[in-house]
Image (cartoon, rainbow, N blue to C red):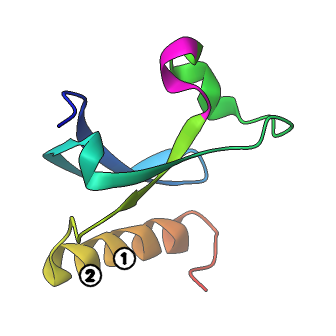
């Protein structure tokens, strides 16, 4: 089992964190994917390039949110978008 902990799951809309959940997950709990080498992604600057190795996409193997938590995240994001001159659709 990996000792890496992912302790912060964050939803970002237009550069602003609008919802999050703190939990304890190991990298074994996720399928991890790298972004293509030709993609210039600003988020790469947040991490040590040797450790991260362009791995920025994480898909959980099991649900990490309850239905209520999921609905709360959707509501929070939609509210943020509606109050920041964006659209929720």
* Residue drawn at 53 percent across, 22 percent down: 46
**Left or right: 89 with respect to 71?**
right
Determine which quarter of the picture holds residue 70. bottom left
Viewer-proximal residue among 47 and 76: 47
Counting from the top left corner in percent of width and height, residue 89 is at 61, 86
Q: Which residues are magenta?
A: 50-54
* Residue drawn at 20 percent across, 69 percent down: 65
Q: Residue furthest front?
A: 1
Residue 34 shown in magenta: no
Q: Residue furthest right?
A: 38
Is any part of residue 19 visible from this angle? Answer: no
Instruction: Assign a secondary structure to mark 1.
Output: helix
Name the residue tied to disc 1.
Answer: 74
Counting from the top left corner in percent of width and height, residue 37 is at 80, 34
Image disc number at residue 34: none
* Residue drawn at 18 percent across, 83 percent down: 67
Q: Main secondary structure of the magenta part?
A: helix
Q: Does residue 43 sit above or below 58 in this rendering?
A: above
Q: Residues within 10 Å of mark 2 (few under 14, many from 20)?
A: few
Is any part of residue 30 visible from this angle? Answer: yes
* Residue drawn at 17 percent across, 37 percent down: 1
Instruction: Assign a secondary structure to mark 2.
Output: helix
Q: CA distance from mark 1 to mark 2?
A: 5 Å
**Left or right: 59 with respect to 57?**
left
Mark 1 and mark 2 in contact? Answer it, CB < 8 Å: yes
Counting from the top left corner in percent of width and height, residue 55 is at 55, 37
**Left or right: 56 with respect to 37?**
left
Counting from the top left corner in percent of width and height, residue 14 is at 61, 53
Name the residue tied to disc 2.
Answer: 71
**Left or right: 87 with respect to 38?**
left
């Amino acid at each position: 089992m990996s000792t890496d902990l992912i302790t912060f799951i964050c939803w970002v809309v237009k550069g602003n964190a609008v919802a999050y959940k703190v939990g304890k997950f190991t990298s074994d709990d996720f399928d991890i994917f790298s972004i293509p080498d030709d993609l210039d992604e600003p988020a790469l600057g947040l991490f040590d390039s040797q450790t991260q190795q362009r791995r920025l996409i994480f898909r959980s193997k099991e649900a990490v949110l309850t239905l209520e938590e999921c609905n709360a995240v959707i509501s929070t994001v939609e509210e943020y978008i509606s109050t920041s001159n964006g659209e929720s659709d």
